[in-house]
Amino acid sequence: MPPEHLSPFGRSLLNRRGFMSKTAFSLGSLGLAHLLAADDKDDPTNFTGKAPIRPNIDPDSPYLTRPSHYDAAAKRVLVIYCPGAVSHVDTFDYKPDLYKYHGEKPPGIPAVTFEGPTGNIAKPFWDFKPRGRSGKMISDLLPHLGSHADDFCFLHSLHTMTSAHPQGENFMNTGFTMEGFPSFGAWVTYALGSDNEDLPAFVAINDPRGMARSGKNNFGNGFLPAAFQGTDFNAKNPPANLRRPDGYNATDDKLTAEVLKRLNGSHLEKYPGDADLAARIASYELAGKMQVSVPEMMDLANEPTSIHKQYGTDTGSNLKKEYAKNCILARRLLEKGVRVVQLFNGSDPSGGNGITNWDSHSNIKDTHARQAEIMDQPTAALIADLKQRGMLDDTLIVWATEFGRMPFLQGNGTGRDHNPDAFTCFLAGAGVKKGHSHGTSDNFGAKAEKDPTSVYDFNATILHLMGLDHERLTYYHNGLERRLTNVHGHVIQDVLA
């Protein structure tokens, strides 16, 4: 080809100096690529430098127990999730400056927040008192939980990346604000399986009023195999379609199950690589086992009267009674070896009225009090019951909400707006320091100040307490090694016992 028909780059290769310089650069690039590949020769898509640990899952038995990445005290986890954003400055995060500047609007307060104009600083709507030997300051809104302060490890410097409830729930429970990603419970059961073959590995106990804002996304499997999605039911609404039809006895049931097992096995042999088919078969087989195990599990009548009194199933509002039954159900599931139990205290929607969840844009003194009446005694009883039975030695408890609330009132003068920059959650049980507080928010509780802690850090720490390395628990999806903590997160060493 004549030189005049070549590109400038092509012509530069025709002279010796250009050819040698380009060749040297290219060889250097090839050498760098070789070195980078050698850093992670097992899987070059993993940027952490750590090879993924992929659980060895039998498609025919996806719930079998699998080893953790390393030894850990926690064998199971209870997540108590409070949708709507609990006000940290009215519960667990004591701020004397709120009393000092009550009714004022000091410099630095934004003019507008999530739902509109801001008002003045407001002191807590409930008095704070020192609790336990640790002297932890906790408000009178939650006296029963406050009595267990010496068992809790509070994280006061949490912050999140969104101030909207659906995205906040997604972020806390899946690590992403968008939908379609696996929930925390799905990741754990994908990694570890379950200690009970007759019950789901992951159970989501929805609030008596219904599901939270993000619905099933809070306990969904995302792109993980379908077997690892949470099974949702509660004490009032058992799993559907488990009751044997009238005129159909146990023998008929057993024979039908055996025929189905042979047919399913034959079909699976034709499609050995179809994970969805294997998951469906496994789910149907689990449903068959649940026909026997669930009715016994759901029968709370055989619990002693003392337990019902302790949890409060016979006092207070009807919602409190139903939630108390959910708490007893949670304990029974954990006792049977269910790996992950997610217990919800609040539903959707509220429209900011705080009647169906903790979202209190107006009348916070009334609406937060209603939610606390439902949540406080039964939740505290559940924790005490687990402790009394010795189950806190190998059970991790996570109490969480999606973000906090502002130290000042909204323009209406009666509610607190969303606060993504500071909020409080707590851990308890296996592997966690007792009577400890990590990090602080500023003097008003407006922003995380000392040891700011992201949701990524929070989830990385929970996985660590379950014996899982958040950087190595991955799933290859659409060209990426996906994980609960995305590309972020560090284990919070300060909270580890």
Image (spheres, rainbow, N blue to C red):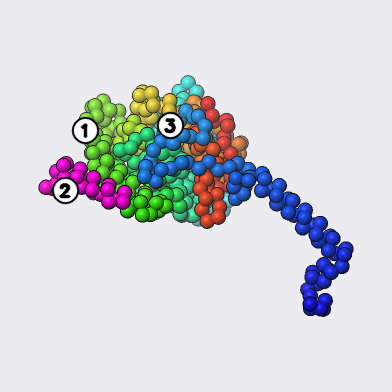
- Residue at the image point whose x is 42% and y is 49% from the top: 225
Whether residue 233 sits left or right of residue 125 in the image: it is: left
Q: Is residue 474 visible?
A: yes
- Reading the image, the residue beneath label 3 is 75
Disc 2/disc 1 C-alpha distance (Å): 24 Å
| 116 w.r.t. 432: above or below | below
Q: What is the three-letter code of the residue carrying label 2? A: Pro
Q: Is residue 263 magenta?
A: yes
Q: What is the three-letter code of the residue carrying label 3? A: Lys
Q: Which residues are magenta?
A: 241-266
Q: Nearer the viewer, residue 292 or 411?
A: 292
Callout 3 crowding tier (Cα within 10 Å): few <14, some 14–19, many ≥20: many
| 123 w.r.t. 43: above or below | above
- In the rendered picture of this protein, how many numbered marks are placed on residues? 3
Q: Nearer the viewer, residue 162 or 235?
A: 235
Q: What is the three-letter code of the residue carrying label 1? A: Ala
Q: Main secondary structure of the magenta part?
A: helix
Residue 116, position in %: x, y? 50, 55
- Reading the image, the residue beneath label 1 is 301
- Reading the image, the residue beneath label 2 is 245
